[in-house]
């Protein structure tokens, strides 16, 4: 049996293991555990260690604010994992995956993010854990805001210091994510401390989830009051068990509708504590920063699915039940003001309440933020490659359509993961396998060369790769929605 791989990092030696033709290293700390005096603080540099640290198990999962039962684990949350084709190689392209969902979960151990197929294709794949929920995004008077983003920057700094020892090229790092992970990628494009830490970016289903400081302060104060804390401060919350805090946020999120009159659009997201445009850590949202030339463009692969909202409506049991009242509320809350509601009804005259709800939610939450990020990045001098996934998920008789997150197991080649089988089925069809190969090859090509393999998305042309059983490069398919949102960037949530 071959000797297990050992690597010397800046903090000490780690020993991983060989697996399916590549080497994996898991649970490597990139910062100290954010507990005790470090709780709600900016990430602190990791401690050094003597001897060899075994890096074969994933680090503990950060406390999750989701309606699922996850047992509490350890507190060494700020860890990362590496899959490399050859630790002895040099100059391999690097993909850093940010597995954040809803700014409520971040589990790099999810089998959907298994790096095997991408490592086999020649990429060094890094997956990270970072703080989410209250730990990462509660707006506290005596703590830095957007701590989850600060964690991501600390992980990218670790990659710059160490990835060459694993065969990677620190000058060819691509940062990537889906949903809130894609929102994280978009935020990193605007943040000065992140400059120089990556060369390219991949963002699937970029959300427009940001709060103003005024709203974030009021929401965090209400959450602290629910907990019986004396004030919305790190000092007042520090002694509350992290997993209890996460569970309380889950319940708090479930009751957001009660605050609709004062908190407006935020109450429809299910995410009370999201990134804050605080003017320092996150100076502004990505769209005006890029179009206003305050941030340089980059090589960007960005896209969304056609039926983004369908997964949420099906899983919540609301699919097929939306009424005209629901459609009116969705349009009033999420269509761009002042004429967006009228424009949607004019653009989709035959649409019933169900289609209107699905269209406006898909647009406002993911499709338009993604498309506009492509446009803004190009305006800032970058090169944007845009895609839309239109292939229908076979599971549940196709009711999910081309839903949110369907593209992730396709890109990672993890069709047999729990999420992959939930969406695609136990036995992937030849069409699913072929589409997975196509998207995966686009990722590898882009991470390696900066070219996704189809025409870039440029002003006037709006060319888009439409991923389906027979993929084609076409003008942007959601032109009606794009025109409704012309001149409107996703704005931060604010007090009503």
Image (cartoon, grey):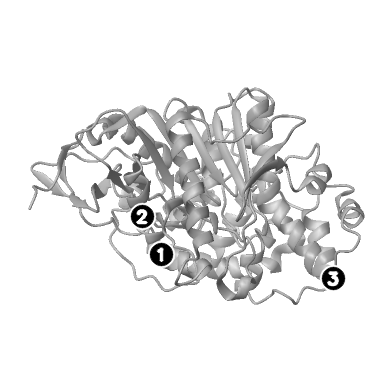
Q: Is residue 227 visible?
A: no
| Earlier sequence position, callout 1 versus callout 2 | 2
Q: Is residue 372 left or right of residue 382?
A: right
Tell me how far mark 1 sits from mark 2, CA to CA. Answer: 9 Å
Q: Which mark is residue 417?
A: 1
Q: Earlier in the sequence, mark 1 or mark 3?
A: 3
Q: Secondary structure at mark 1?
A: loop
Query: At x 42% / y 32%, what residue is drawn?
Result: 448
- Report if the CB atoms under discs 3 and 2 are less than 8 Å apart: no
Q: Nearer the viewer, residue 61 or 494?
A: 61
Identity of the residue drawn at 35% across and 33% down: 157
Horizontal and vertical percent for residue 328? 85, 64
Residue with the mark numbered 2: 114
Q: Residues within 10 Å of mark 2 (few under 14, many from 20)?
A: some
Sequence-first disc among 3 and 2 = 2
Residue at image location 66% in from the left, 61% down from the top:
309
Provide residue 251's location: percent of width, then percent of height.
55, 70
- Whether pointer 1 and pointer 2 mark residues with C-beta atoms closer than 8 Å, the reply is yes
**324 shown above or below 223:** below
Q: Which residue is mark 3?
A: 325
State left or right for residue 311 relative to residue 224: right
Residue 255 x/y as whole percent: 63, 70
Please tell me whether residue 99 is drawn above or below residue 70 in the rendered image: above
Q: Is residue 201 above or below residue 424?
A: above
Few, some or many residues within 10 Å of mark 1 (<14, 14–19, 20+):
some
Label disc, if present, on residue 69 of the rendered structure:
none
User: Splitting the image into 4 quarters, where does residue 294 fall?
Assistant: top right
Q: Position of residue 389 (x, y in %)?
A: 62, 52
């Amino acid at each position: 049996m071959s000797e297990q791989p050992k690597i010397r990092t800046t903090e000490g030696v780690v020993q991983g293991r060989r697996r399916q033709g590549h080497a994996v290293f898991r649970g490597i700390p990139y910062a100290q555990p954010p507990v005790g005096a470090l709780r709600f603080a900016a990430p602190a540099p990791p401690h050094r260690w003597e001897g060899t640290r075994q890096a074969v198990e994933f680090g503990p999962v950060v406390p999750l604010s989701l309606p699922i039962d996850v047992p509490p684990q350890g507190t060494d949350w700020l860890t990362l994992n590496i899959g490399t084709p050859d630790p002895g190689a040099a100059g391999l392209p690097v993909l850093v995956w940010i597995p954040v969902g809803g700014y409520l979960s971040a589990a790099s151990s999810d089998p959907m993010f298994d790096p095997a197929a991408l490592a086999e294709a020649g990429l060094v794949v890094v997956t990270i854990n970072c703080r989410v929920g209250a730990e990462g995004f509660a707006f506290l008077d005596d703590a830095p805001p957007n701590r989850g983003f600060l964690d991501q920057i600390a992980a990218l700094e670790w990659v710059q210091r160490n990835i060459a020892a694993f065969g990677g090229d620190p000058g060819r790092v691509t940062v990537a994510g889906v949903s809130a992970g894609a929102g994280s990628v978009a935020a990193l494009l605007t943040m000065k401390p992140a400059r120089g830490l990556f060369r390219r970016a991949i963002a699937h289903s970029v959300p427009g989830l940001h709060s103003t400081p005024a709203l974030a302060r009021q929401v965090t104060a209400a959450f602290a009051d629910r907990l019986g804390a004396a004030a919305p401060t790190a000092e007042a919350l520090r002694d509350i068990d992290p997993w209890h805090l996460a569970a309380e946020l889950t319940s708090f999120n479930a009751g957001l509708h009660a605050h609709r009159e004062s908190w407006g659009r935020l109450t429809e997201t299910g995410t009370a504590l999201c990134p804050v445009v605080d003017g320092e850590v996150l100076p502004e949202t990505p769209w005006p920063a890029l179009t206003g030339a305050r941030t340089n463009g980059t090589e960007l692969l960005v896209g969304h699915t056609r039926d983004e909202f369908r997964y949420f409506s099906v899983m919540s049991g609301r699919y097929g039940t939306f009424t005209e009242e629901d459609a009116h509320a969705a349009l009033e809350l999420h269509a761009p003001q002042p004429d967006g509601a009228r424009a949607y009804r004019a653009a989709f005259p035959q649409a019933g309440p169900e289609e209107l709800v699905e269209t406006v939610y898909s647009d406002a939450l993911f499709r338009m933020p993604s498309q506009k990020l492509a446009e803004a990045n190009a305006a800032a001098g970058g090169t944007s490659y845009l895609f839309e996934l239109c292939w229908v998920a076979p599971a549940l008789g196709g009711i999910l359509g081309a839903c949110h997150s369907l593209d992730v197991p396709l890109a990672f080649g993890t069709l047999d993961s729990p999420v992959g089988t939930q969406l695609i089925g136990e036995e992937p069809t030849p069409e699913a396998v072929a589409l997975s190969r196509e998207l995966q090859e686009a990722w590898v090509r882009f991470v390696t060369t900066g070219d996704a393999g189809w025409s870039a998305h440029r002003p006037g042309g709006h060319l888009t790769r439409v991923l389906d059983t027979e993929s084609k490069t076409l003008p942007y398919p959601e032109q009606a929605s794009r025109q409704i949102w012309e001149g409107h960037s996703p704005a931060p949530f604010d007090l009503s």
